Amino acid sequence: MSQTNTPLDTLIELARDARDQAGQNLAGEQRTSSQVSQQLGSLHRYRQEYAEKLNAAMRDGIDPATMRNYQQFLASLDDALVRAREALAAQQQRVERTRQHWQQQQQRLSSYDTLAERREVARRRDEQRREQHASDDLVNNRLVRQRSSHSEH
């Protein structure tokens, strides 16, 4: 029996493609989130190291101009940290939106799969009924032939 594509089969295929594309988008957003998080960590470590250098310089004695330069640079690092945290928060929101979209696509695909399973169950049930009917007809025809052959004797 050749399998022809029904509209439901086409919907399932399209839903599977959409779900797969949403999954790829989600993976990309998660990679970007991880990179932004790593950059934030690197920036935070760099700021800590620079603050430690300032503390060491202050212990050893530092002129006011150098102190001002250190403080300005630390302030610019603090600003960069704020921007990096904001970027990470925005990226995490994109990840969550993309995850929700993927989940919606997965639910749509699951719904179509459920419909296809129900259709297959109904098809098998109908086929079993036809086979049972054909079997009953064969048995009835055999009985009729046996009776007619007995009545002829």
Image (cartoon, rainbow, N blue to C red):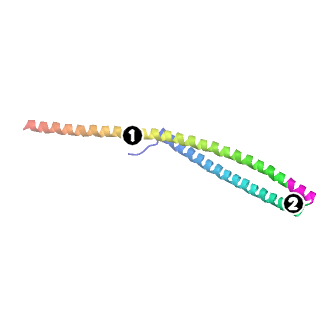
Q: Residues within 10 Å of mark 2 (few under 14, many from 20)?
A: few
Q: Point out the residue furthest to the front here.
A: 59
Kindly tell me whether residue 44 is visible in this rendering.
yes
The amino acid marked with disc number 2 is Met
Quarter of the picture holding the C terminus: top left
Give the residue furthest to the bottom: 60
Residue at horizontal 35 percent and vertical 38 percent from the top: 125
List the residue tagged with mark 2: 58
Tell me where residue 117 sits by quadrant.
top left
Q: 136 left or right of 112?
A: left
Q: Position of residue 99 (x, y in %)?
A: 61, 44
Q: Give coordinates of residue 124: x percent, y percent.
A: 36, 41
Figure quadrant of residue 143:
top left
- Name the dominant secondary structure of the magenta segment: helix
Query: What segment is highlighted magenta in the picture?
Result: 63-72
Mark 2 or 1: in front is 2
Indicate left or right for 137 with 66 as reference. Answer: left
Q: Residue at x 86, y 54 (%)?
A: 71
Looking at the picture, tell me which residue is in the foreground, 25 or 1.
Answer: 25
Tell me if residue 82 is in the magenta stretch. no
Task: Give the labeled residue for mark 1.
Answer: 121
